[in-house]
């Protein structure tokens, strides 16, 4: 699988400019060497939001997905005497996602604070 790259603002402007001049998405795709699906998504976002700039996110990306968070919560409630290491191993064997004991502990503290 090819590595993903973000489009810089200049290239986004180039794409939008060519589309607004009447070129088709396929033509722009071939000219710039960018997948047609990327051009299509960019154009659709412009139509919907009027904005094509990238949404910058702050903070570290999450290790677990929402369904894995639910799995941890349910498993912790079913086995109240389980340690964080036990929960980490169970999550790893069930979903293949490896998380540290500290991550499980932090998740548990956060879920307790939300209640």
Image: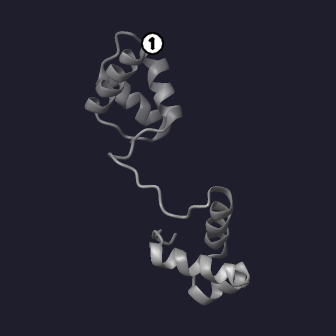
The residue under the point 29% across, 24% down is 105
Q: How many marks?
A: 1
Give the answer, above or below, for where 51 lies relative to 77.
below
**Which quadrant is home to the C terminus?**
top left
Indicate left or right for 27 with 93 as reference: right
Direction left: furthest residue: 102
Give the answer, above or below, for where 56 lies relative to 98.
below
Task: Please tell me how crowded label 1 is: few (under 14), some (14-19), or many (20+) other residues with Cα within 10 Å.
Answer: few
Q: Secondary structure at mark 1?
A: helix
| Foreground of the two, 46 or 38 | 46
The residue under the point 67% across, 79% down is 19
Q: Position of residue 69 (x, y in %)?
A: 46, 29
Q: Position of residue 66 (x, y in %)?
A: 51, 34
| Foreground of the two, 93 or 10 | 10
Q: Determine the image quadrant of residue 89.
A: top left
Q: Is residue 106 visible?
A: yes
The residue under the point 26% across, 30% down is 102
Give the answer, above or below, for where 57 lies relative to 106.
below
Q: Position of residue 76 (x, y in %)?
A: 42, 17
| Foreground of the two, 18 or 5 | 18
Direction bottom: furthest residue: 31
Indicate left or right for 8 with 88 as reference: right
How was the colour assigned to the protein in this rendering? one colour
Q: Is residue 34 visible?
A: no
Residue for badge 1: 77
Q: Position of residue 49 (x, y in %)?
A: 62, 56
The residue under the point 67% across, 57% down is 48
């Amino acid at each position: 699988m090819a590595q993903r790259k973000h489009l810089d603002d200049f290239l986004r402007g180039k794409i939008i400019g060519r589309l607004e001049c009447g070129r088709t998405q396929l033509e722009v795709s071939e000219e710039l060497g960018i997948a047609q699906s990327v051009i299509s998504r960019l154009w659709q976002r412009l139509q919907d939001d009027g904005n094509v700039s990238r949404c910058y996110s702050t903070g570290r990306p999450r290790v677990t997905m929402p369904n894995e968070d639910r799995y941890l919560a349910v498993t912790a409630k079913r086995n109240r005497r389980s340690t964080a290491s036990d929960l980490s191993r169970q999550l790893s064997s069930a979903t293949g996602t490896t998380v540290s004991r500290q991550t499980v502990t932090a998740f548990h503290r956060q879920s307790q604070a939300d209640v």
